Amino acid sequence: MRGRWILVVAVLVASALAAALWKRPELGRLVDRRTARERYVDGLRSAGLGETALVRDWLAAADDALRNPAGATLPLETDVRHSPAAPKAYGYRLRLQRGRLLRVELTVSGTAPAMVFIELFPADESVSIAPVAVSDGVEPRLAHETERDGEYILRIQPELLRGGEMRIGQRTTASMTFPVSGRTSAAVKSFFLDPRDNNRRQHHGIDIFAPRDTPIVAAADGVVTLVGTSELGGNIVWVWDAARGQSHYYAHMSRQAVTAGTRVGAGEVLGYVGNTGNAKSTPPHLHFGIYSRGEGPVNPLPFVKE
């Protein structure tokens, strides 16, 4: 019994140290850039607890969550209960689209505040691969913009010796602002890769229909690189999104409202809906395209669909 109490105290001390380091990032930077979970595990090992049965079971539960995740369709909300005496981790296999913002939010209840580690892994790699996104272990949430289509594994693990109930909420949302003011994805009537000109070319964007002169807004922060006219696009604006390495293309405007070199924030007005260029025979709409550096056109809809 005395040995177990010593183990409990040591684990709690290691947990407190890990939490303190993560809440004080300037301290963590003096050591390295480990994740919250890596700091926690190393703290347990430094305390001489790495080979105890309890810690081995906790690590094994984490591995099992990656190897045998439950299939999940988003949005998802799940209630789970975990015992302090039985280490547990929860794994979920998710199908995510590029441009979607994954949001994971936990509601944790228990006898005392606890760290919960949230990590997102690519499903097509081994369990030793580094996660593509992690929580800080203190705040019970994670937000991550997906950079490529594919399957991912979400792992959620409470720290040792903390029991209670936990509600796990998972969903995806748009990662960008919808580019036509007051409209939603229901206004999209023409889609990425739709055929054009009797199948001679493909549509490299989406068409968002709205009344003439409805404001067109920046989908993301960026710098206006070109304001001009073209045969196909009519009145156009290009915005460079450095954070994503993308150029955003806004076409068929009735008129533009910015100048080249202007820095804009998401939601700022760039121009107004029209049907200039090769859209003269169609109702007013915005053609919105995304071009990724080194890749070319990508589907804009997942980025802006609510």
Image (cartoon, rainbow, N blue to C red):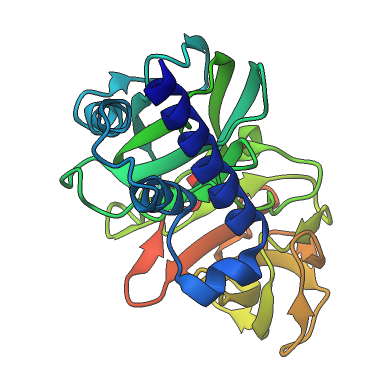
Residue 79 in sight from this viewpoint: yes
Give left or right: position of 269 versus 301: right
Give left or right: position of 138 versus 146: right
**Numbered disc total:** 0
Residue 53 picture quarter: top left
Asked whether 176 or 75 is in front, the reply is 75
- Residue 244, image x and y in percent? 51, 68
- Residue 74, image x and y in percent? 47, 23
Give left or right: position of 57 versus 12: left
Quadrant placement of the C terminus: top right
- Above or below for 7 versus 261: above
Farthest bottom residue in view = 261
Asked whether 39 or 92 is in front, the reply is 39
Residue positioned 78% across, 86% down in the render: 259
Asked whether 89 or 123 is in front, the reply is 89
Residue positioned 50% across, 9% down in the render: 81
